[in-house]
Amino acid sequence: MAGRVEGKVAVVTGAAMGIGEAIARRLAAEGARVVLTDVKADEGERVAREIGPAALFLLHDVASEAAWDQVRDAVLGTHGRLDILVNNAGIQIPGSIEDASFEDWRKVQSVNADGAFLGCRMAVRAMKAAGRGSIVNIASVASHSGEAQGAAYSASKGAVRALTKSVAIYAKPFGIRCNSIHPGGVDTPMIWSLRSSMGLAPSPPGVGAPDDIAYAALYLASDEARYVTGAELLVDNGRTITPPVPAS
């Protein structure tokens, strides 16, 4: 099946690399006009160029309310509407509840939780007039199982998980759907950097690929998921149902 989001206008945050890049490429390949946003200008512009005329890159700090207003104005000014928002931008700073600094806590919340809130609010306001739309929030299995060295990250993704359900309930009368995707380990630059900072190998065996998440986002963004809202889609190779292997 081709053209699953043909003619739709999508915004994908954190689209300069990793999962966001894969989602932007997949949506464009299926017919969407895609606005990629990120704080990494060079990488984001490169991805937009490689996608072609259907793509536009915007420099965007998702933790800034004013920046979201600028994205809204640019998208509506260029395309006249917004059909899909993928809140993907996120950061992870390792630290347990004892070791994590309050500064790191606030930084992670500002990007992961505040960014998702601001994005959902912008999208609902922009989509209401059309009476349709799909918001896809990229959360994490950390919102289900927690991570000992990810106190701030786990909490931020738990906020995204709960926010998704609130938005789904509120926006349903307007024809707007809101769902979350919860990836397990995915082979991305963020994971490489995180594992390197912890003295671990860059990519552990059995991790997923960014495209595994991109196909899930494509489904939720498309009209195939018209009866799906408030859902949590776990894309984790059974991580949340498989007992952990004891350390040897």
Image (cartoon, rainbow, N blue to C red):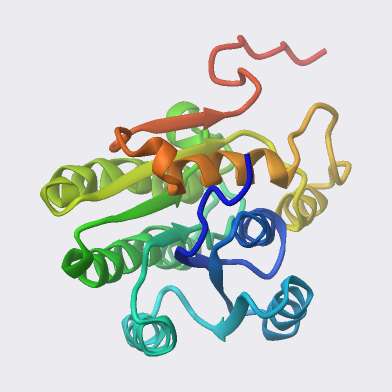
- 56, above or below 36, in the image: below
x and y percentages locating residue 61 in the rendered image: 48, 79
Decide which of 175, 13 is in the foreground and name it: 175
Decide which of 53, 43 is in the foreground and name it: 53
Residue located 71% across and 64% down the image:
17
Quarter location, residue 243: top right
- Check the image and name the residue furthest to the right: 201
Left or right: 163 in relation to 145: left
Decide which of 63, 48 is in the foreground and name it: 48
x and y percentages locating residue 3 in the rendered image: 58, 51
Residue located 48% across and 64% down the image:
7
Left or right: 161 in relation to 54: left
- 45, above or below 135, in the image: below
x and y percentages locating residue 114 in the rendered image: 35, 65
- 245, above or below 34, in the image: above
Quadrant containing the N terminus is: top right
x and y percentages locating residue 20 in the rendered image: 62, 59
- 78, above or below 135, in the image: below
Quarter location, residue 8: bottom left
Quadrant containing the C terminus is: top right
Residue located 76% across and 33% down the image:
207
